[in-house]
């Protein structure tokens, strides 16, 4: 646990338990529910259990929602797989959407059967910026 009181180790040792509790209570008092959960779990985002669909050759899609400490959606991550007729992976497409469902990132990894190295392509996302 981080030093919540701003005191050194020797200063904390000189305090009694009630003084330390009071200092800790003062530290936690202004924190929101979200901040308390994030502090307790030492994380700022939490992923739901992924939803996976499978097909003849394996996974077709894997979608996961990432939430903040109070459960609000931060982003949705989706991985789509397609396969050659032989069952080998052809393309992997990773799409990230923001909390409002807008696509913010898309990356495609194309695999080849002829021995070439896979190619990673970041696909541009069109932004509609209002004109002044």
Image (spheres, rainbow, N blue to C red):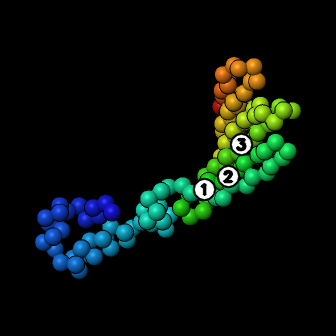
Q: Is residue 127 visible?
A: no
Whether label 3 touches label 1, CB < 8 Å? no
User: In this rendering, is residue 96 above or below 27?
Assistant: above
Q: Earlier in the sequence, mark 1 or mark 2?
A: 1
Q: CA distance from mark 3 to mark 2?
A: 9 Å
Residue bearing mark 1 = 47
How packed mark 3 is, by other alpha carbons closer than 10 Å (few <14, some 14-19, many 20 or more), is some
Q: Using the image, tell me which numbered label, if any, was put on residue 64.
A: 2
Q: Is residue 4 above or below residue 78?
A: below
State the SS at label 3.
strand
Q: Residue at x 17, y 63 (%)?
A: 9
Is 44 located above or below residue 120 in the figure?
Answer: below
In-front residue for pair 121/128: 121
> Residue at left 53%, top 61%?
69
State the image quarter where residue 82 is shown: top right
Q: How crowded is the residue under tag 1: few (<14 C-alpha within 10 Å), some, or many (20+)?
A: some
Q: Image quarter for residue 114? A: top right
Q: CA distance from mark 1 to mark 2?
A: 7 Å
Q: Where is residue 34? Give x, y as percent.
A: 50, 64
| Res 78 → quadrant | top right
Marks 1/2 in contact by CB < 8 Å: the verdict is yes
Q: Quadrant of the N terminus?
A: bottom left
Picture coordinates of residue 52, whole percent (x, y): 75, 52
Label 1's element? strand
For label 3, the residue is: 79
Q: Residue at x 72, y 48 (%)?
A: 62
Residue in view at x 71 percent, y 42 percent: 79
């Amino acid at each position: 646990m981080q030093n919540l009181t701003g005191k050194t180790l020797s200063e904390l040792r000189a305090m009694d338990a009630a003084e330390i509790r009071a200092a800790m209570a003062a530290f936690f008092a202004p924190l929101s529910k979200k901040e308390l959960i994030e502090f307790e779990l030492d994380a700022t985002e939490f992923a739901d259990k992924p939803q996976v669909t499978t097909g003849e050759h394996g996974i077709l899609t894997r979608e996961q929602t990432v939430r903040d400490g109070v459960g609000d959606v931060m982003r949705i991550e989706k991985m789509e797989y397609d396969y050659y007729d032989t069952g080998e992976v052809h393309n992997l497409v990773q799409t990230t959407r923001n909390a409002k469902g807008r696509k913010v990132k898309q990356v495609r990894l194309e695999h080849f059967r002829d021995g070439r190295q896979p190619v990673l392509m970041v696909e541009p996302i069109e932004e509609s910026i209002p004109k002044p």
